Amino acid sequence: MEPEKVKEQLRTDFVGKEIKYFTETTSTNDVAKELASRGAEEGTVVLAETQTQGKGRLGRRWLSPKGGVWFSVILRPKIPAKD
């Protein structure tokens, strides 16, 4: 996987301007949360070829074998969290 080629194909205003790529990570969501807490820009994509501890909805385990595209996107919506 080549993040620069992915970036070249994007036609978005802000999603994917910054791509953090890993051949393997525990969870793209965990990495995205950490980056967001350190001020990463909205639209930053965390992309991995495989995850060892991926998570789905409600904390369910997410199987993420090599050969897929596993990613999380940092969003900072301007709406209250309760909504």
Image (spheres, helix red, strand yellow):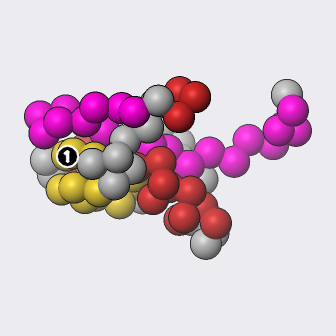
Residue 55 higher or lower than 42, as above or below: above
Q: Residues within 10 Å of mark 1 (few under 14, many from 20)?
A: some
Residue 12 higher or lower than 45, as above or below: above
Q: Main secondary structure of the magenta part?
A: loop
As rendered, which of 61 and 15 lies closer to the eye? 61
Spot occupied by residue 25 in the image (x, y as percentages of width and height): 29, 56
Spot occupied by residue 6 in the image (x, y as percentages of width and height): 25, 44
Q: Residue at x 21, y 45 (%)?
A: 50
Q: Residue at x 85, y 28 (%)?
A: 83
- In the displayed structure image, the side of residue 64 where residue 75 appears, left or right: right
Extreme residue toward the bottom, this view: 38
User: Residue 80: in sight, yes or no?
Assistant: yes
- In the displayed structure image, the side of residue 35 where residue 1 appears, left or right: left
Residue 52 higher or lower than 12, as above or below: below
Q: Which residue is mark 1?
A: 49
Q: Considering the numbered disc 1 on the image, is that residue within a helix, a strand or a loop?
A: strand
As rendered, which of 66 and 42 lies closer to the eye? 66
Spot occupied by residue 65 in the image (x, y as percentages of width and height): 17, 36
Q: Is residue 57 magenta?
A: no
Q: Residue at x 45, y 59 (%)?
A: 31
User: Residue 41: in sight, yes or no?
Assistant: no
Spot occupied by residue 70 in the image (x, y as percentages of width and height): 31, 39
As rendered, which of 42 and 58 lies closer to the eye? 58
The magenta segment is: 61-82
* Residue type of the residue flagged with mark 1: Glu
Picture quadrant of residue 64: top left
Q: Is residue 62 magenta?
A: yes
